[in-house]
Image (tube, rainbow, N blue to C red):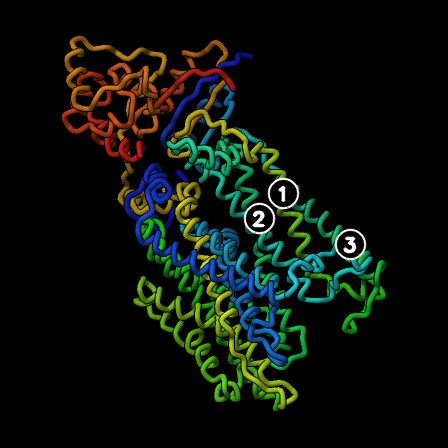
Amino acid sequence: MSTKVIQALYDDDDVLLKAVKEVRAAHHHIEEVYTPFPVHGLDKAMGLAGTRMAITAFLYGITGLSFAVWFLNYIMISDWPQNIGGKPSFTFYHNMPAFIPVMFEMTVFFAAHLMVITFYMRSKIWPFRKAENPDPRTTDDKFLMEVAVDGNENELSDLLKRTGAIEIKVNEKH
Amino acid sequence: MGHYEAPIREPIIVGDKSYHDITQDVAAPIEGKANKQWKIAFTISLLAMLWGFGAIAYTIGTGIGVWGLNNRINWAWDITNFVWWVGIGHAGTLISAVLLLFRQKWRMGINRSAEAMTIFAVVQAGMFPLIHMGRIWDGFYTLPIPNPLGSLWVNFNSPLLWDVFAISTYLSVSLVFWWTGLLPDFAMIRDRATKPFQKKIYSLVSFGWSGRAKDWQRFEEVSLVLAGLATPLVLSVHTIVSFDFATSVIPGWHSTVYPPYFVAGAVFSGFAMVQTLLLIMRKVSNLEAYITRVHIENMNKVILVTGGIVTVAYLSEFFVGWYTGSSYEDFTYLSWGAATGPYWWAFWALITCNAIIPQFLWVKKIRTNYVWTFIISIFINIGMWFERFDIIVINLSRGHLPSSWTMFSPTFVDIGIFIGTLGFFFVLFLLYARTFPVIAQAEVKSILKASGDNYKRARDNGEEVHHESHAEPVHVEEAPKAEENHEVKTSSLLGSIGTFDINTQTPDDLKRISGVGPVMEKTLNQIGIYSFEQVSKMTKKEYDLLDSITGSFPGRAERDDWAGQAKKLKS
């Protein structure tokens, strides 16, 4: 594999989307696309697999709920049962109506925070991390497509020009 | 291409914006200097906050005996303020979560500030239970952790403990939701920042966001799932706050209608506070193009609906109090006894501000008017404070033992702490308005083509919107064409804008000027232009000279107003 990439800059999301489809149709490998906002349909056009964030959230939620059940049962029923305000504490089942708020809050707490942490880890975003968008304008109004170069630089840049790129440059892959 | 939106829907981004315009408009309050009004408002808020902190220190040092609480009225301003602030903290997550699930695009102009308001309001709310403990250093007893009393645990049957879990989950999830949405916008500010310190700070807070396609895919799904989680969460929080009252056996509190009624009241007061803040902010921060009449009217409609729910709840409470025939129900906060008793003024403040005044919003002229909306929102803020005051103080002022009937009078400490939280809230909000991207600009950009005024207009007329003339693609490896005889022109150009010594001065990154690419920068450097200082001095004459030297992009520099941009960048 060559370590070079060709970077094509676009100034419109629709032009970019069309370009992505054309570059893929011509069997070139799109390394990455940087956009200032979510361009709908871009992931499909690039052929990215769907994300599983929602599934992780569900699993984390189940974990939170199970933890809450164990935790409440241990504290209120087995470790130190107390009759408070006549609310029965003989079994978990009897006392459960009073536990529902906390069970719910813990489910949400686990699902939300662990999902976001997973997102940050998977996308490699955290404090002190350096940004990697190759051009600062890609957070403003420009869209950048990175295509792997394999000795076919001229052919590629011609293709990219035809798709409406406003700037084209060849760079080392980082 | 997929941007169609029915013409009957009013545009929610006005003023013929392009993507770059949105960037500039959102970045402007951060990059510009604070004006006088901001400084005055900030100073007042800061003083109020300091006074409040003093009052809190006095409370903690001496004990809550310094408040006006008495034997009968053992909750008063503290819990009133707590519930009031939590209620205000409901609009933000409601706007960003519930409206996201309902695919309401107008949320995008206001969600960032509404969420900021939520977080800052919940911070204020959280302080009241903490200082109300009296011995705040024993606060860890509310957490289910082993403590100095052996294996004595907290009581999970108590709604007060449910509150601890609900409020802390709500605060932390709202914060994470807010910050995740902020990452791309912080990244935008980071990539524009010219000062090294600014760049450093915004690099840190943007967590190195790069905007990859995969990141965006995850970002969108995470936002959607968080919205799905936050929606029941936001409803649960005020439900649980209402349990603090509803599960007790005090007349007027013991009421099954409380949860839905409290949630509606919270949304009602939260939206009123959003109106109050954003009506000022859209003017001060020049965001009229993004927070439009449509936004204001939609929020007023939400206020009308939730205000209606609250009013119906008042009527039903009033009716049930009378219908029981119990003499103890005749002094609850919504009863004939309350309306004519010693707290008649609090009763009528509630009815006037919450049930009567919002009805004016049925009139379209009033609900689309900024000034009237602002006035009504202030009334609702006041009315909702009185609602909580009435629930707590009027209900407690009379009990089963008539000999202990009493009134509540706040001390200067009660008032000081309340004023202090107002000050603290505005300190946070004012700082936010100057340092955070106050519009979710990435999201707004994604709906520009569907809901932007210019795009909608063009689509209806079968035209296309052109913001920039498409230049020919540039290939960076090509050396720029040198023109003969440009020595003379160059020296005359540099004569008027000043020279730059590459050996002693550091050149600026001219690519930051919109319209200057790597090629143009190289060309400019060859001529001897390296700094924003030089570019900022360019006028029509210099632009023409430049065009004749470079021979590329004629007229581009003038059209993009390089000098104006450079002036901003160098400051």
Quadrant where the C terminus of chain B is found in the figure: top left
Residue B264 visible (yes or no) = no
Toward which corner of the image does residue B495 lie, by quadrant? top left
- Characterize the local packing of mark 2: few (<14), some (14-19) or many (20 or more) Cα atoms within 10 angstroms: many
Identify the disc placed on residue B146: 3
Q: Are marks 3 and 1 on the same chain?
A: no
Label 2 sits on residue: B226
Determine the residue positioned at 49% across, 29% down: A131
Label 1 sits on residue: A115
Q: Chain of mark 3?
A: B
Left or right: B106 in relation to B371: right
Determine the residue positioned at 39% across, 32% down: B195
Along the viewing direction, whichever of B410 and B10 lies nearer the viewer: B410
* Nearer-N-terminus badge (3/2): 3
Residue contact between numbered discs 3 and 1, judged by CB atoms under 8 Å:
no
In space, the residues marked 3 and 1 are separated at their CA atoms by 29 Å
Residue contact between numbered discs 2 and 1, judged by CB atoms under 8 Å:
yes
In space, the residues marked 3 and 2 are separated at their CA atoms by 32 Å
Residue B111: percent from the left, percent from the top?
45, 51
Q: Amino acid at mark 2?
A: Leu
User: Dot 2: what SS?
Assistant: helix
User: Dot 3: what SS?
Assistant: loop
- Characterize the local packing of mark 1: few (<14), some (14-19) or many (20 or more) Cα atoms within 10 angstroms: many
Q: Nearer the viewer, mark 3 or mark 2?
A: 3
Determine the residue positioned at 28% across, 13% down: B480
In space, the residues marked 2 and 1 are separated at their CA atoms by 9 Å
Q: Chain of mark 2?
A: B
Residue B536: percent from the left, percent from the top?
24, 30
Q: Chain of mark 1?
A: A
User: Dot 1: what SS?
Assistant: helix
